[in-house]
């Protein structure tokens, strides 16, 4: 994910060594997500969100309309393939696969953090592959909020860098990811977090396309999300707890590097954050579209997120896992997901997401909503 490109950053720009390390790290993230214990032990909270089953659905599956407006575009379904990769040789192939599936199904698709490609032009194509294979899809570029501010004397990304990131993938929107837990656990991670909001506001001012503020596994609180909206972001991707945990991934990387201190930090904060369902509750009334990413594992989870007030859901690990087997396998996976979503809508008496009534909440999510005065 975040490159956390803090390596070799003393002085001005990240040097060739830093770029090489960032490439390795991106490959390692992917390997660990696929093979390792990369998923949060706590869940995203979907089991606490109950759609009201209707004995008389009132519509047929064929009548369900999943089309969704998002930042001026119309998607064929309220689903985004989460931004994940780019920056090493195999990533181009993977991004091509993700792009092809998004194009075929009319979904949005993101790329992983592009900083490495702003440093090393030879890996730009591994990001650009998405746009080449999805000429008409809604594509999100990606940079890290921590890389928008000074880190240890290394200046943040410039407006020209952001314009290049957008141009590289023909982005319709630019995701700015927040990943403080990951940076803290990552042995080479960034450590300065003062001024992140100003960094995001600067990106909003400089970006030629709308900015989406995105968390990456720790979720969003209402106060922070309100400030992000005030800074001008056009949408929030809550990136909640449940699903992929970068504290776990960095813990395992640290252990492999023999960094016991970082590995222990990763273990302690392995499940830090606000679950995705609760994060949607925190953010749903702020006047911008909310994307529910983090532990969305079925079309039923997606329907629950939409009923809570999300506009889209984001799917990360399951998409990248299916993509290992090629475009047809990924399309099959996503078609199944969309069938589940249609079934959930019919069973809840809705022919479109907007017709889903308020869900009944239970357990942790209800308690969270009560104590946080979100109901
Ligand atoms: C291999 C991998 C790499 C990722 N890299 C990035 C990244 O570079 N930038 C980013 O904003 N999010 C990144 N993410 C986070 C995803 O966008 C998403 O928020 C996260 O995977 C949660 O969704 P999931 O539980 O469905 O996997 C990455 C996720 C995975 C699985």
Image (cartoon, helix red, strand yellow):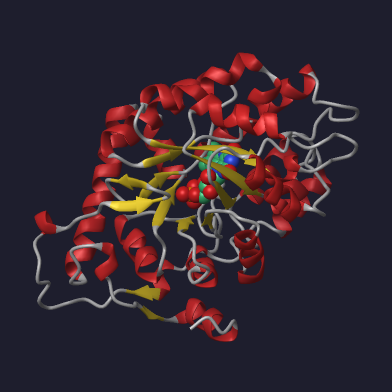
Question: Measured along the vertical axis of the image, is residue 84 above or below residue 247?
Answer: above
Question: Which residue is rendered at x = 39% and y = 48% of the image?
Answer: 72
Closer to the camera, 283 or 84? 283
Residue 182: tell me if it is visible: no
The percent position of residue 162, horizontal first and vertical second, equals 64, 33
Quadrant including the N terminus: top right
Q: Quadrant of residue 329?
A: top left
Question: Which residue is rendered at x = 80% and y = 20% of the image?
Answer: 15
The percent position of residue 353, horizontal first and vertical second, equals 28, 63
Closer to the camera, 121 or 216? 121
**Left or right of 40 in this view: 290:** left
Q: Quadrant of residue 167?
A: top right
The percent position of residue 20, horizontal first and vertical second, equals 72, 20
**Left or right of 76 in this view: 310:** right
Image-quarter location of ligand 1: top right
Question: Which residue is rendered at x = 49% and y = 61% of the image?
Answer: 288
Closer to the camera, 17 or 364? 17
Closer to the camera, 326 or 302? 302
Residue 283: tell me if it is visible: yes
The percent position of residue 104, horizontal first and vertical second, equals 27, 33
């Amino acid at each position: 994910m975040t490159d956390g490109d803090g390596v070799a950053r003393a002085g001005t720009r990240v040097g060739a060594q830093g770029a090489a390390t960032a490439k390795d790290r991106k490959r390692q993230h992917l390997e660990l997500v696929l093979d390792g214990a990369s998923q949060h032990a706590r869940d995203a909270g979907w089991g606490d969100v109950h759609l009201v089953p209707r004995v008389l659905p009132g519509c047929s599956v064929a009548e369900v309309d999943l089309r969704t407006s998002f930042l001026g575009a119309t998607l064929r379904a309220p689903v985004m393939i989460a931004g994940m990769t780019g920056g090493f040789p195999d990533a181009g192939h993977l991004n091509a696969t993700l792009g092809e599936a998004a194009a075929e199904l009319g979904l949005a698709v993101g790329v992983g953090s592009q900083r490495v490609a702003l440093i090393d032009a030879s890996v730009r194509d591994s990001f650009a592959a998405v746009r080449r294979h999805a000429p008409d899809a809604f594509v999100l570029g990606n940079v890290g909020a921590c890389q928008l501010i000074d880190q240890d004397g290394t200046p943040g990304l410039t407006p020209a860098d952001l314009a290049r990131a957008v141009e590289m993938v023909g982005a319709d929107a630019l995701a700015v990811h927040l990943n403080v837990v990951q940076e803290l656990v990552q042995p080479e991670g960034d450590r300065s977090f003062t001024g992140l909001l100003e960094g995001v506001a600067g990106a909003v001012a400089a970006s030629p396309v709308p900015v989406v503020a995105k968390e990456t596994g720790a979720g969003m609180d209402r106060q922070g999300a309100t400030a992000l909206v005030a800074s001008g972001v056009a949408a929030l991707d809550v990136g909640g707890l449940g699903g992929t945990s970068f504290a776990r991934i960095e813990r395992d990387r640290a252990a492999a590097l023999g960094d016991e201190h970082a590995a222990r930090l990763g273990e302690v904060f392995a499940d830090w954050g606000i679950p995705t369902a609760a994060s949607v509750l925190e953010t749903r009334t702020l006047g911008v579209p909310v994307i529910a990413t983090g532990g969305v594992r079925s079309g039923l989870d997606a329907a629950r997120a939409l009923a809570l007030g999300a506009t889209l859901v984001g799917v990360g690990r399951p998409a990248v896992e299916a993509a290992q087997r090629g475009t047809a396998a990924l399309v099959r996976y996503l078609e199944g997901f969309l069938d589940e979503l249609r079934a959930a809508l019919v069973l809840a008496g809705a022919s479109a997401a907007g017709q889903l009534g308020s869900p009944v909440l239970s357990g942790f999510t209800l308690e969270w909503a009560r104590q946080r005065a979100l109901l």
